Image: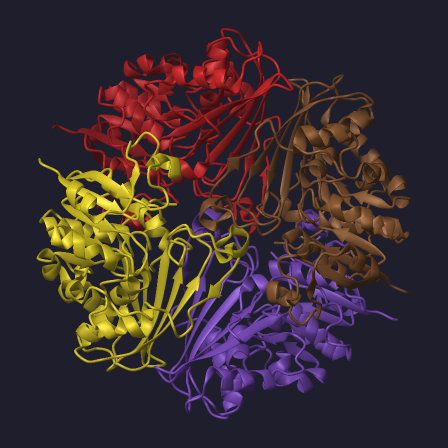
Chain colours: A brown, B red, C purple, D yellow
Amino acid sequence: MTKVRVAVAGASGYMGAELLRLLLVHPRVELTGVTSERLAGERLDRSFPHLRGLTDLEFHDLRPEWLADVADIVFLALPHMESQRAVPGLRAAGRKVIDLSADYRLRDATDYVTWYKAAHIDPAGLGEAVYGLPELHRKAIAGASLVANPGCYPAGAVLATAPLFRNGLARLDGVVIDGKSGVTGAGAQGRKVDPMYLFTEANENVQAYGLASHRHTPEIEQELSLLAGAALKVSFTPHLVPLNRGLFTTASVVLASPLSTADLTAVYREVYAGEPFVRVLGDGDRPTTRAVVGSNYCDVAIVADTRTGRAVCVSALDNLGKGGSSNGVQNLNILCGWPERTGLEAAPVYP
Amino acid sequence: MTKVRVAVAGASGYMGAELLRLLLVHPRVELTGVTSERLAGERLDRSFPHLRGLTDLEFHDLRPEWLADVADIVFLALPHMESQRAVPGLRAAGRKVIDLSADYRLRDATDYVTWYKAAHIDPAGLGEAVYGLPELHRKAIAGASLVANPGCYPAGAVLATAPLFRNGLARLDGVVIDGKSGVTGAGAQGRKVDPMYLFTEANENVQAYGLASHRHTPEIEQELSLLAGAALKVSFTPHLVPLNRGLFTTASVVLASPLSTADLTAVYREVYAGEPFVRVLGDGDRPTTRAVVGSNYCDVAIVADTRTGRAVCVSALDNLGKGGSSNGVQNLNILCGWPERTGLEAAPVYP
Amino acid sequence: MTKVRVAVAGASGYMGAELLRLLLVHPRVELTGVTSERLAGERLDRSFPHLRGLTDLEFHDLRPEWLADVADIVFLALPHMESQRAVPGLRAAGRKVIDLSADYRLRDATDYVTWYKAAHIDPAGLGEAVYGLPELHRKAIAGASLVANPGCYPAGAVLATAPLFRNGLARLDGVVIDGKSGVTGAGAQGRKVDPMYLFTEANENVQAYGLASHRHTPEIEQELSLLAGAALKVSFTPHLVPLNRGLFTTASVVLASPLSTADLTAVYREVYAGEPFVRVLGDGDRPTTRAVVGSNYCDVAIVADTRTGRAVCVSALDNLGKGGSSNGVQNLNILCGWPERTGLEAAPVYP
Amino acid sequence: MTKVRVAVAGASGYMGAELLRLLLVHPRVELTGVTSERLAGERLDRSFPHLRGLTDLEFHDLRPEWLADVADIVFLALPHMESQRAVPGLRAAGRKVIDLSADYRLRDATDYVTWYKAAHIDPAGLGEAVYGLPELHRKAIAGASLVANPGCYPAGAVLATAPLFRNGLARLDGVVIDGKSGVTGAGAQGRKVDPMYLFTEANENVQAYGLASHRHTPEIEQELSLLAGAALKVSFTPHLVPLNRGLFTTASVVLASPLSTADLTAVYREVYAGEPFVRVLGDGDRPTTRAVVGSNYCDVAIVADTRTGRAVCVSALDNLGKGGSSNGVQNLNILCGWPERTGLEAAPVYP
């Protein structure tokens, strides 16, 4: 069984670290290169002590030509704005790219100006990128050369509500989404050293941030609008909660017509039937981040709130998992035509 | 300065423990009795080692006559349904009562049948009870004989949104409220030993519970409807997050007409001017539970979401503080005509 | 590649859950049965929601004949005293057993009377059991029919200090060992519902327990005495710290003659050369539980304290990993003659 | 009742923040000045949001003349080496100083060269400084002009073992001390932004640091030697555990002659009789950090380990409390001749 050569650019953060964890044991992958501007020349296991004994690789500096040379497929775990600088060179060299940054997620280039305050410098790439949520775009991903892996909040929000919008069961206005993320997801992916992320500040604390302004908002709206067949807007509020991994989403949606919890659950079960990584809970079972951490699962449940004519849609995922790196590996599997669970069979790490 | 004799019934849980912490140093209070059915006859500091050296009291069994004998004012930190059994006897003996349970919060007795599945056995008491949120009912509390201290979620939700409804700035439909509570608040007040509250289960975990069915829902609706002058309903979802203390509320409300964040903040500042325990944040500052833990403060902020015509209203409080025991002490101060900060001057415990 | 049929008795606790996580993806294992007296008849994924979609097995009641029927090798994750009731029947049926309880760890049957307050009921089994720490007893394990998997504290303490005692570098008196365990290890393995293990009690807390009386003490002494060739005693104090997984050991040992940190580290490197799961750190690197969680690694380091003539020996492991279930899988691999890393290749889960 | 004017230099860290919390409600104190080089000109409640509404003070830059002008007594919560630059000017101006740094704790000036790698620049001040552990030096503190508040680990270690050494019950060799500190104590007092203190790194982690080299070692040795009347050395290992506040100490000491747990406990009770902030536990009760957090208490217990001829001495304190700021306030009370519990009456914050 020949292996595919895979590299990871920007591997010094938590998203990169999780990719390394997964790729090092992926049966079809040979990890051939990792980059980090900051750590170039240093052994991986110096910065990531948990990898001692598992790899002899060193961080390389970020040169697209070098990456194109050592790898067939390249993951980018770079900060926003840096991916769009690296992608054109990689694509010119014929390499497929799975980008974990936000750089290729939004289809409308003007959204980058609005939300990221900068024009996109690779509109050609943007035009060909496929939004990498397999549950929505599996076929397109299979044929893509550039996959834009979803943000963690959008992954949770879209999977929690997609069946409603896809099936015309929800009204387009009045969508309110509340996200609660562990610290590896909420801005500290790059192991960024900011006071807000100090143990003493984040521990025993809950806070909202990015009120009415978080950049994942247009991404959620894009995907739900696509499903609904009409533009919709969402009120989205992200929160930082004291856990390392885990993202919980609570979405409140106005039902187009009255449906019971059992009806709604049946719809979800049908929509997600066959999905290897979405588990629909019912009968009083509720998603918890505890039950998905370390895996590519997204657990979802829906409950009708008959008093208000709304539905409560909840989902739990690992922000470094289905909300990031392991979803990226699922995309890799799809790109390569492998079974989607390849390298992702391990159970969540409980407790 | 003569002291008032105060007793606490049901002091074996966390809400009771916090009352003891506050009452033991309250300059106008003499703590004269504590009860616990389970721990009767045992010294307080056996069950609460942190109180060693601070009190020689023992837990007494719950006899209203005894309580009426030893105290002028009685706090009830009993489970739901038990308060309404104890209150009539205390009131018959002329004792004022501050009840921390849910038993006297809802004005409409039929709500108890709907939400608590049992008829109220003390409709007379219920008729005279005053909802103990000083920011809304200060005058009534001052003259009350029975104060129903608010639930933790209602305290956070009402304080976060009250200025909008009081001033007619919000539409009555489409209110969505998301609560995140530490473990002392979310059902474990009684130090209940349930697997859900084990460290290994609650740690590194986020979960929703009581979807579309939590009993604090009618309490929120009652108070906001009263402010709005018309009945409204809310979609409320509570969550358990891994902290000991702290409750964060995120409410999304449809604005009746477009207003800026600055406009809204000004309204909040005006409504809460003079309130000793509500701090309105602005200029990018955001509430965090970290900044209120151990105190009676509720920090609030509001942001306009002009894209969706909504406002995001957030609040942070300590569920054992403004969401429970210290709010009860504020009620005690009002009942007795003392300055409201008496015994509540201590700063939050940071970090 | 034929698979070996493996069963787990007593799978309702955390140790059992971790075994399931590992065995479900072990390439040479078919998981054929799991038992739990309490949960018999219930699907595994009802009690362990993280396993949804990964197994259709149900808990069976604990009948040795049934276990012998469905499996070639049986793991016992039962409470103390229950293993020794199950083992004789399994062995009579020719089944190999890996016991994760304390029942077969102590060679001297009188130690059970002293430390566990009960005579051993299977002295024959005890006589043939092999202490399952591969780094010390690899050859004996390979030929064993009954393997007594080490306790979590002994695993950490013995691996931290073994090279000193094996090589005669330490004095036999004055050994002081301090253990810090996460909550899954410190008595809550069985998901036991005890107030001490409530989130609200264990969170933000450190406490010592079992002072001068913990049952892992004779186990540590047995193995270190065996290495030293003479009886020694240790002063051992275990602690409960607020983490789910992870066990850190700090041992202070009197050096027989002065040696530098570099000398000592060289000895450790030599002793553990070739060990697939012990990583010796040096050059200022220090073990952390963070770097081993979710894996079978034990990271160790040693530093000379020249001022006091002592050495500080530290180790970090996952109490459910090298301190429990994954070490059990390593024993399984040895028993079956498979490469020791089979099924244990995954990197630690960081962060 | 006239108040004493008190200032805090270096109030931007956690130790300073805790001082502010205590001094703001101290009935005999008027807080007249706070300094921070980094935050000079900024309001306190900008950096410490929990203090909103409690003070209008601003951070001032660190000028001893200014401090001497605004305050009668000055707390220094400065980093090591900075206190000894500020003290001479304050003392020249006749101000009493309570220094929370390490700068005046060691009596032997050469120890600063050995452990802090720099000669002391204020030997005159050092000669007059009194080690500020009231339980050992109450009388000297009362008459001091410069009080060196103990380090957090030494406070825990000395209080845990002092009765043994004072009464000649322990041998001088073989003392092994293990400390476990929350993150506010272990190097992050200054809200220092170092990767080691990130939530994602410190959470769910235990690690040792400063092996055989921590600077609190000579401080522990100094005080225990003084009590024993002869020089002794200790093997001390500090650890970082995932809590905000709390320090737990486990000391193992060789008994000079066999004594039972009851005997030893009686000794401790006698030695600490009358101490307002040391609570001796017995009868199976054990110290926990949970029971002292937010207070000036240090809970201690001792158990005989008859098998090894040793005693296990454990203590729990709040590193910002008895291990720092509140012990400083106790020193202030002693300096001023006030009852020692003044301003320190509040119960620990549980849970």
Residue at figure coordinates x 27%, y 42% from the top left? D34
Count of labels shown?
0
Residue C63 in picture, x, y percent from top left: 70, 64
Looking at the image, the residue that sits furthest to the top is B229
Q: Is residue B36 visible?
A: no
Query: In the picture, which quadrant includes the N terminus of chain A?
Result: bottom right
Residue C53 in picture, x, y percent from top left: 77, 49
Query: In the picture, which quadrant includes the C terminus of chain A?
Result: bottom right
In-front residue for pair B269/A32:
A32
Image-based side of D82 in relation to C327, left or right: left
Image-based side of D45 in relation to C280, left or right: left
Examine the rendered structure and indicate whether residue A288 appears above or below residue A304: below
Examine the rendered structure and indicate whether residue C34 appears above or below residue C229: above
Image-based side of B33 in relation to B228, left or right: left
Residue B321 in picture, x, y percent from top left: 37, 33
In-front residue for pair B188/A8:
A8
Examine the rendered structure and indicate whether residue D42 appears above or below residue C263: above
Examine the rendered structure and indicate whether residue D38 appears above or below residue C2: above
Residue D64 in picture, x, y percent from top left: 21, 49
In-front residue for pair C178/D215:
D215
Residue at figure coordinates x 35%, y 82% from the top left? C308
Residue at figure coordinates x 74%, y 65% from the top left? C7
In-front residue for pair A109/C258:
A109
Q: Quadrant of residue C282?
A: bottom right
Q: Is residue C101 visible?
A: yes
Image-based side of D173 in relation to C264, left or right: left
